[in-house]
Image (cartoon, grey):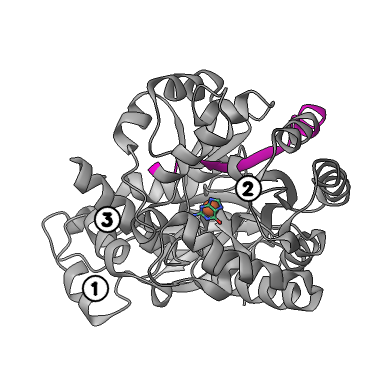
Amino acid sequence: HLGQLIQFNANPFFEGANAAKHVIEGAILVDNGMVEQVGEAQTLRAEHPDAAVQDHGTHLLLPGFIDAHAHYPQTGMIASWGKRLIDWLNSYTFPEEIRFQDPAYAKEMAERYLDILLAHGTTTVCSFCTIHPTSVDALFEAAAKRNMRVFAGKTCMDRNAPDALKDMAQTAYDDSKALLDRWHRKGRASYVITPRFSPTSTPEQLSALGQLWAEHPDCLMQTHLSEQVDEIDWVLSLFPKARDYLDTYEAHGLLGRNGLYGHAIHLTDRERSRLKEVGAGLIHCPTSNTFIGSGLFDMDGLTQAGHTVGLATDTGGGSSFSMLRSMAAAYEIGQLRGRALHPSELLWLATEGSAAALRDDSIGRLVPGAAADFIAVDLASTPAIAQRATRADDIWEALFPTIMMGDDRAIVQTWVAGSPAL
Ligand code: GUN
Ligand code: FE
């Protein structure tokens, strides 16, 4: 067999009582961009003596991170100071998004963004683009160059935005449909129908996009829901007949199992039960929720009720491109709400949980048949992390300091479809 055997030593530097349990060396057999086998290195080496072996020593191999909600056009204005949601959009976000009318700028930012993601160990993103169709082409073209599994769509807005960022109900439908036909399921691309949020779409535009979704029910639909209290008040004043924020989507054909609802912080009981009933995906964006001052996502209540929850950076509302930092922020928000999320839950959210929300079981896991999108993680990437990790008794204790204090220095290498990225 001529695959590639990528080997690691599960957790070699434990000093604690359980150290003896953890000296297993693991390996992943990769062929044709896919994971063929996962198991003990010794066994796999014996079974595949001709496979080229790469030994990654003490580095831990994990599935690549999956960022389930981001705005690649906000790369250039991330970490903008001092505003809450609506003022932040008007002061910083919209002016930057206008710049994407220039296809050369969109291309430059798309390339830069995906390289930043790969350096942070993120192999899949579900991103908003701008209203400009060329901003969607730019991201999918940059993703195809890197062979990355990327989900994205044209952001639609026909009110409450600068003229340069407005389309119309019909052009939003036409442009989205043309992009969907061009990109959806081409290579590793998936098109996502993308109304920004209720305040920036007329009922006519929401209906037009609901119609498009009804015609392509296998497509995902992404938007924002109940992020800030002021935003919710605004939505209810714009849609006087709506029972609640979710109803503004529901009434226009924009509520469904393949829907992704970013933030979903301040939900009413009716919204919770409707979201649960349809099995929609809720996307937790913890660094954004603290940075913009939005509120504390109810991870415990929602997961115990059986909701599908993914994890995301929401850059540039989020303050970091790193899914490690997002896991840390999810942990901190859990603490503020009264429960410490276990490192295994945090890691699950950033990989398999986000994959489940994106309805793709070929990513986010290292199992036979999955895409070979994975990373090598240094659990001792800085002196501060190293001195803490060496005291660990088990793998979760060894990983947690990297979750809380790690950044792109912890990501030693990223593979996309079996090949090293960057
Ligand atoms: N709501 C509508 N648009 C946006 C956006 O770009 N970022 C965030 N965080 N919330 C939004
Ligand atoms: Fe967002």
Look at the numbered disc 2 and give the secondary structure of its residue: loop
Say the numbered circle drawn on residue 395: 3
What span is colored magenta in the figure? 212-229
Distance from disc 1 to disc 3, alpha carbons, whole Å, reads 14 Å
- Camera-side mark, 1 or 3: 1
Residue 267, percent across and down?
40, 31
Nearer-the-camera pick, 208 or 279 = 208
Amino acid at pointer 1 = Ile
Say the numbered circle drawn on residue 215: none
- Camera-side mark, 3 or 2: 2
Q: Badge 2 local density, few (<14 within 10 Å), some, or many (20+)?
A: many
- Is tag 2's residue or tag 1's residue first in the polypeptide sequence? 2
- Camera-side mark, 2 or 1: 2
Residue 355, percent across and down?
55, 43
Q: Is residue 120 magenta?
A: no
- Is tag 3's residue or tag 2's residue first in the polypeptide sequence? 2
Say the numbered circle drawn on residue 385: 1
Q: Residue at label 2?
A: 196
What residue lies at 63% left-to-right and 77% top-to-bottom?
112
- Is tag 1's residue or tag 3's residue first in the polypeptide sequence? 1
